[in-house]
Every structure is written in structure tokens, then in C-alpha cells.
Image: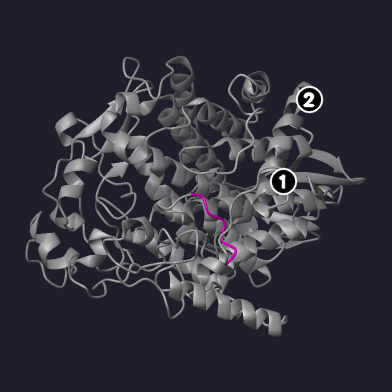
Amino acid sequence: MMKGFLILYYMSTLFLLFPNLAFGSHNYGEALSKSFLFYEAQRSGYLPHDQRVQWRGNSGLNDGKASGVDLVGGYYDAGDNVKFGLPMAFTVTMMSWSIIEYGKQMSESGELSNAIDAIKWGTDYLLKAHPEPHVLYGEVGDGTTDHYCWQRPEDMTTSRAAYRIDPSRPGSDLAGETAAAMAAASIVFRNNNPAYAEELLTHAYQLFEFADKYRGKYDSSITVAQKYYRSVSGYADELLWAAAWLYKASNKQYYLNYLGENGDALGGTGWSMTEFGWDVKYAGVQTLAAKFLMQGNADNHAAVFEKYQEKAENFMCACLGKGNQNIHKSPGGLIFRQRWNNMQFVTSASFLATVYSDYLASAGKSLKCASGPVSSPELLDFAKSQVDYLLGDNPRATSYMVGYGNNYPRQVHHRGSSIVSVKVDPTFVSCRGGYATWFNRKANDPNLLTGAIVGGPDAYDNFADQRDNYEQTEPATYNNAPLIGVLARLHGGQSEYSQLLPVAIPQQKPDPEQKVTPASASDIAIEQKETTSWVREGKTYYRYSAIVTNKSSKTLKNLKLSVSQLYGSLWGLSKYGDSYMFPAWINSLPAGKSLEFVYIHTANSPAVVSVSSYTLD
């Protein structure tokens, strides 16, 4: 404690003597890239051929078998080998929200394909976990038996029992969060994989109906989760959260009405929150509802949505320390909520502050706090200060992202990273033997858990890099999920489109090695039509849909399109130089098939789209 005080005193003195002294700038793009490597390290199941984290192997290959269901895949939540459904679904929701808001910046950084892969690894599992409309598997493995052992995922000998909710054992919070995850992810996949997006949305509809009709807390049904992911807030927030995402994904009035008619009864308009995370979703609901209001979509529920917005702004003001009930901050400036994995609240608050800053900026508004109005850049500056602290601008000069910077945690509370890779030494690691040989060794991890965000320092900026210090050195998937959006925003700068315009479906970068040859355009038909228009701040925006159809009898490959007289943004194609090409996940277009892309611009006439080159195979 004295050492931490002396460091803080020394740094405070420096700032008093040298007020212009500043930490070095951070490489947010590097941090973003490393964040996705962490998700690859957390994968369960059969690892794909393009797996980049090579020290991991296949694991959990019989998950669900004893229950007659395939539950192979998904993510381990943290440093253990259990698959907990509630935090996994929240992770998917927040990754999806990050892409929905900042997919363009991710694409420009070259990380969009990794982001989408990370989401799909989660949604593929969630689809398996929902085999019937009113059945959802919410956990594989048992935290008690799992924590008794210290083994690599590849060596697991612990219970892999599967636990479910159904009408007789309800779990509205779990079903609601999973509905939110699938609805949010459906927006990400809507244009590039429409069949998959529709499947996700169908499951989301079913899960919401299940959650709302059969109400109850999931940890009263899956009691083994109580010690690890107890639903303290109950299920009311998840019902509103799911409705908000279903409205955003489907534009169906039913879900907007649900938010408007149940906001008071379910607490959405009554609670002013100082936290947002896998358990308590109110601040997220309130932020989304405020966006709907600023978009002009509240309809006859405007008065209710204004109350949502008031509570959203109370959260933002609390983060800034300018509200009536403020969030505690450490001497070094980090918001502090709890000893165990405090960093989850840092990243989630930073994300909400970032998106709300952009909402305000695009609407030309300021934040109303008890101490007076706050500009949108000040809210973004807060988020940046939290991210910079996490990456090393703190009294310890420690990066709390593993592998970023020079001074980061080396003894992470994580089974896989702390035990030699099965590919280096396949010798079986026993349940208790893992503790004796690997957990208790006072040495750096043999495998670098790149991109993992650990629990972080205490309320006084103190941190102990010790494997048994699970409160501070254990990572979690939901720590990274909100942060990827903030990192993309900080790395990419202000987006070219308003955050209040209809959702921009992000696209991936093309393969720079792709080769094309000229050919006749008679094999390809391009049809365009205006689908909608709207006026904002005196300017009219037009949305166009363009359908590219392969009229030939062969497979169309290496397509290059020229798009001119475009006065806005385009989604559904990848830009390479002055041309537009297939997204990275579409290699070809079979005979008779079509591809849709859309664009929004300010001209009351379509852009000029023509074929530059292609090949037929």
C-alpha cells in the first residue's frame, strides 16, 4: 500500500510541476487486434483450420451428449472451463453492438472479419443451445467441480453436465439475454448472410416469447450457477433489453410498444444506474431507448422514452462525476465498482459513454448534468481516459491487457495459459496435479493469453500479478466485448455517417491478392431502386437497394464494380482502391443467384453502377 502511495504521490507531483506532461499515445488498432485473439483462446469445441492461437487444442467434444443434444462449441467464460450461458450471451450482444456502431472503423482497421468470426462462434453455439422454442440450455459444466481441478480444457475430467430452462423451470433473464444476443447479431449478418440472420431472428422471437410468458430467475432453475453468475437484478431488465434489440432488429411496432408500455412496471424508467454489465442491463436499455427517441421513433410513447433518456443521462453524468449520484473513482482516475473483476464495469461504461457521445453529436445536443451541460466531446474524453488507464496510463504504468505494452500481467488466473500447451507436451495433466505443478509455480505463464483484459487494480490503484489473485488477474469474455467498439472508435476517429441514421451493415476488406480479368457485362444484371427517404436537420437522405444477378450459366468470381456519383456510404460490398468487390466471406456467386448491396446518399437519383471486370468458372 505504501509503495502504491509513493508512486501516486510522485506522479501527482510531476503533474503539478509539469502540467503539460502527458502519457504516450496508444495504438488502439493494436489493442483491437489483440482483443480478438483472446476470443480464439477461449473457444471450446473443434477449433477451425484458421485458428491463430496455436497453443490451444480441441476440447469439450462430448458436451451435451449425455442430454441428447449437441452443445459442442461456444466460449469458456473466464479462467475456468465452464460454459455459462448468461455471460456468453451478453458477450455476443455487446460484440454485435460494437460492430453495429463501429463496424466501418473495424473494417478500415482490417479486423472486421475477426470480429464477425468471434460473434458467429458464439451464435452458432447459442443456436444449438435452443433446440426447442421453450427450451434453452444455460450451462455446460459445474463451477464447483471445475474449480476443484486445475486442468487444460483439452484434459478436462470434470463434469460436463448440461443444465436447461423450460416452462417448468423458467429463466426469463437467461432467455431474454439470449434473445437480445441473437437479435443484435442478426443485424450484423443481415446483408452478407441473410439466411443466417433470419434464423437468428426467428430464435430471438421465440426466446422473447418464452422469457415473457414463463417468468422467473434462471438461477432458481439452474441453481449451480448461483455461486458464479447469480441474477441479482432479476429478469425485468433483460425483458426490456431483449425488446429493445428485437425492435432494432425487426422494426416491429410490438417491441417498441413493449418498451413504452412496460418501462415503468419493469424498472426501465425508474432506476438511475451506476453500473452496466452481464447482470444489470438497465443503463443499456436506457441508452438504446434514448437513441430511438433521438431518431424520432418513439411514436406515441415519447413521454416514456424521455424518462428512459433522463435515466441514461444520469448514468453518463455519474461516470463523469457530475451527477447527483456519482461513480467512485480511484486516485488514478479509474471508475471503481467492486474488488472482483472491476474492469468489466470500466469497459462497459466506456462503451455506453462513447456511443452516447456520438448520438449527442449527431443530434447536435449536449448532456444535461446536475452541474450543468456537458458537451459530447467531454463524454468521449471520459471513455478515452478509461481506455488509456487500462492500457497503461496509470500510477503503476501497467497495461491490464495481456500482451499490450511492456508491463502487463504475466501470471494470469487462467487454466489454459498457465499450463504448458498440449501441443508442446501432451502428457496428461490430472485434476489436482495441475494445482501442484502449474497453479502454484511462481513463474510466468507458458502461453501468452494475448488480448485478455484482467480484473484490474483495487480502489487505490494497487495490483498484484499473482495467479491465485483471481479477483485481479482473471480475465473474462465480457470484459473485452464492449471495449472492442471503443477501441475501433478511438482508432478510426469520427465515422462518416451519423450514428442516428439507419444501421450500417459493416463489411470486410477484400483480399489484396485477388486477380480479375476483363469480360463482357452481358452476363450480369444490375437493378436499383429507392427504398426509403427521410429528412434530418433540413437535409434529405435516400436509401437505395441494388441487386446484382448472375445471368450466366457459370459461377461468377472476381467481380469488380465501378460506383460513381455516390454521395454517401455504401454497405454490402468491399472497397478496394477505386473499385467495389465481393466481401471477404463471399468468394463467388452461383448461376442465377443475386447479391444485394445498399447505400444512403443525399442525391435524389441513383449512383452509377457498372461492371469493370469479372471471371466465370
Quarter of the rendering occupied by the C terminus: bottom left
Residue 49 can be seen in this image? yes
Disc 2 and disc 1: Cα gap in Å? 22 Å
Q: Amino acid at mark 1?
A: Gly
Query: In the rendering, which numbered label is found on residue 413?
Result: none
Which residue extends farthest right? 538
User: What segment is highlighted magenta in the picture?
Assistant: 332-337
| In-front residue for pair 196/1 | 1
The quadrant in which the N terminus is found is bottom left
Q: Is residue 560 left or right of residue 292?
A: left
Q: Is residue 200 left or right of residue 121?
A: right
Residue under label 2, please give it. Answer: 303
Magenta span dominant secondary structure = loop
Residue at 58% in and 69% down: 388
Q: Residue furthest front?
A: 2
**Percent from the top left, x then y, of residue 44?**
27, 51
On screen, residue 82 above or below 173: below
Which three-letter amino acid code belongs to the residue tagged 2?
Ala
- Whether the magenta-drawn stretch holds residue 334 is answered as yes
Residue 465 placement (x, y as % from top left)? 34, 69
Q: Is residue 590 above or below residue 11?
A: above
Residue 231: where, in percent of width, then height? 41, 32
The one nearer the camera, 18 or 346, is 18
Lower sequence index among marks 2 and 1: 2
The image position of residue 563, as x and y in percent, is: 72, 61
The residue that disc 1 covers is 323
Residue 485 image-quadrant placement: bottom right
Q: Nearer the viewer, residue 142 or 499?
A: 142
Q: Is residue 110 visible?
A: no
Residue found at x 81% / y 58%: 567
